Amino acid sequence: DLDYYKKIRIFVKKSFSKKLNFHRQRENELIANIYSKKLVEHLISLGAIDGNKSKKIEIPKWLNKKQKLYFIRGLFDTDGSVTFKKKYKDKMHKYPVLTITLKSKRMIKEIASILKENNFYLCTCYNEKAYDKRNGKNYERHTIYISGKNNLERWLKLIGLSNPKHLTKWLVWKKFGFYPIKTTIKERKQILKLSIQNF
């Protein structure tokens, strides 16, 4: 997510005149920090939650309908995923599936409700058992599945994709009609320079 965090750093600098600092906590985990008590207090006044947020988090009540979609885009950029599945007799991964997975059942219900209000067709799965490799603990998670080309096109029109991790997957699929799984962002950027004959 380094490319995405670089975009966020520019936004933070422009909006708050603060520097976003990066450091690696684990091999594939990047931590972003801002040291500013004043900024934290301002965000809390707007509805941000301090401390352990997984059970308490909710969508701010003061957001209007359009802002709620922006909120979902930001959440999806960090906690969502874009995948392409094999369907029926397809030999390649062509069928788009968007997923959002969180520990907060409340937040998943709120997001699902907003998406349904905007005519998305989706499936929600609650109380899934999962294992966190980072701390070796089991936990419960809750997931929204948004499947199909029509849903993807509607997502791009109403919400959009900002994280290059997701955006490059969609661009490869859009250009070639299928998606090569287990590729990195760097590999996808190279693929986008190719024609279908080179693939």
Image: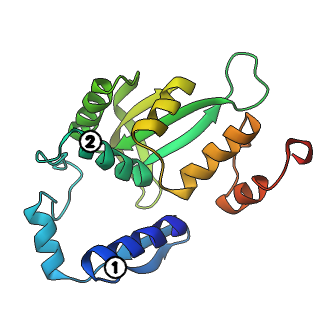
Q: Pointer 2: what residue?
A: 66
Kindly identify the residue that appears in the image at 28 percent across and 36 percent down. 111
Residue extending furthest top? 88
Kindly identify the residue that appears in the image at 67 percent across and 57 percent down. 184
Q: Residue 21: x and y, percent?
A: 39, 82
Q: Residue 167: x and y, percent?
A: 57, 50
Residue closer to the observer: 106 or 77: 77
Residue closer to the observer: 20 or 16: 16
How far apart are the alpha carbons under marks 2 and 1? 24 Å
Q: Is residue 62 left or right of residue 144?
A: left
Kindly identify the residue that appears in the image at 37 percent across and 27 percent down. 125
Q: Amino acid at mark 2?
A: Lys
Q: In what element is the residue under mark 1?
A: helix
Q: Is residue 103 above or below residue 119?
A: below
Q: Is residue 186 left or right of residue 191?
A: left
> Is residue 182 visible to the viewer in this orientation of the structure?
yes
State how many labels appear: 2
Q: Amino acid at mark 1?
A: Lys
Q: Residue 166: x and y, percent?
A: 55, 50
Q: Residue 179: x and y, percent?
A: 71, 40
- Quarter occupied by residue 92: top right
Quadrant location of the C terminus? top right
- Quarter occupied by residue 88: top right
Residue closer to the observer: 121 or 66: 66
Kindly identify the residue that appears in the image at 31 percent across and 42 percent down. 69
Q: Pointer 1: what residue?
A: 13
Labels 2 and 1: the sequence-earlier one: 1
> Is residue 104 visible to the viewer in this orientation of the structure?
no
Q: Is residue 94 left or right of residue 147?
A: right
